Amino acid sequence: MPFRDGGSDQCAFEMIASTQPPTEHLPSTPAGLDRAAELLAGGRLVAFPTETVYGLGADGRSGMAVADLYAAKGRPAFNPLIAHLADPEAARGEGHFDEHATKLAEAFWPGPLTLVVPQRENGRVCDLARAGLGTVGLRVPGLPLAHDLLARCGFPVVAPSANLSGRISPTSAEDVLGDLQGRIAAVVMGERTQVGLESTIVSCLEDGPRLLRPGGIPREAIEAVLGRSLPGASPSSGQPIAPGALSSHYAPHARVRLDVDAVRPGEALLAFGGARPRGFEAARDILDLSPGGNLAEAAANLFGYLRRLDATGVDAIAVTSIPNAGLGEAINDRLRRAAADR
Ligand code: TXA
Ligand code: MG
């Protein structure tokens, strides 16, 4: 994987950056969105906000654009991408929706839900974007700015989170530029994202609905709509279990230690709900994801706070425990990946 930490990667990064035109900073105005849509239609890469995280968009019909996208992210090409559409009707044109997918789309679109369904014969999302699978991941984002951009495009825009592969997902335009400035054509300069965690991914295939990735919509809300409990990805499906094929996925430079009851010398503290573990007075920095113990607030702050503590150059970040219910499942999933060996 290119562009992970390490000196020679930095060198490669600078060589590429110096040969690219500068990244355009587009305002979130009709003119800015027109320009973003024009660049995307021309096969260029444009980062844009959704309510979850910023995505790095490319024309999902174009194998060339998608190949450029994988290269810009330094992403392994076997990881399929989510196709974003302006509205549920457009999404239904790309995939076959069974009764479960139909119910979930009605309940949660537009919003932070991705549905993996069989691709239609005339579906436009190219093979490379689907990593050769017969299925397609579809999402109708809830952020009006994202809707307005997608409506201008009229084609599926594939978009992974707009960070270098293996790094923390971006929740602001500044985060995107920190990773991708000079490597992509443009960024739509929107607000900081409200949800702060990626979409929940549910597959609706022959073996029934399954939770592939916890995210912005809690499992409990999905189970309530379906009237049944959601198993995880089928181990026999042979599909990459999203996005866990890579266990170290949301990695700051600093080591991450979870469920701490004591802070070690030199560590920064990432707390939840006002928790103050032993030794906290000596922590290099302290950020609390939600002093009042609100999981939605913690989700919205998670990636930004990890980036802020990481930027101080601290060796390790100690994290207090977070309840696993509701959005806590997705928060704990991302924290475990950030803490995984790499
Ligand atoms: O909130 C989000 O979901 C953001 C915004 C930009 O939409 N996107 C995002 O994309 O998180 P990404 O590429 O970081 O994660 C997409 C995940 C991948 O882990 C991939 O495995 C899964 O979606 N996925 C996409 N299509 C799939 C398919 N056909 N079958 C199984 N998994 C799929
Ligand atoms: Mg990602």
Image: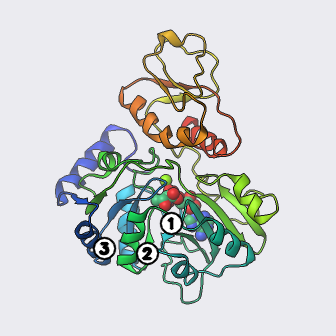
Q: Are marks 1 and 3 in contact (CB under 8 Å)?
A: no
Q: Quadrant of residue 100?
A: bottom right
The answer, for residue 235, to whether it is visible in the render is no
Q: Is residue 63 left or right of residue 342?
A: left
Q: Which mark is residue 60?
A: 2
What residue sits right under mark 3 in the picture?
37
The answer, for residue 298, to whether it is visible in the render is yes
Q: CA distance from mark 1 to mark 3?
A: 19 Å
Q: Residue at x 32, y 73 (%)?
A: 40
- Figure check: 42 above or below 213: below
Q: Nearer the viewer, residue 137 or 273?
A: 273
Expressed as whole percent of the image width and height from the top left, the position of residue 149 reads 36, 70
For numbered disc 2, what is the local secondary structure?
loop
Q: Nearer the viewer, residue 34 or 175?
A: 34
Q: Residue at x 58, y 17 (%)?
A: 276
For numbered disc 1, what is the local secondary structure?
loop
Expressed as whole percent of the image width and height from the top left, the position of residue 258 reads 61, 28
Q: CA distance from mark 3 to mark 2?
A: 13 Å
Q: Are marks 2 and 1 in contact (CB under 8 Å)?
A: yes
Q: CA distance from mark 2 to mark 1?
A: 9 Å
Q: Residue at x 40, y 55 (%)?
A: 162
- Figure check: 165 above or below 66: above
Name, please, the residue furthest toward the right: 228
Amino acid on which disc 2 is placed: Gly
Q: Quadrant of ligand 1?
A: bottom right
Q: Nearer the viewer, residue 8 or 199?
A: 199
Amino acid on which disc 3 is placed: Ala
What residue sits right under mark 1 in the picture?
81
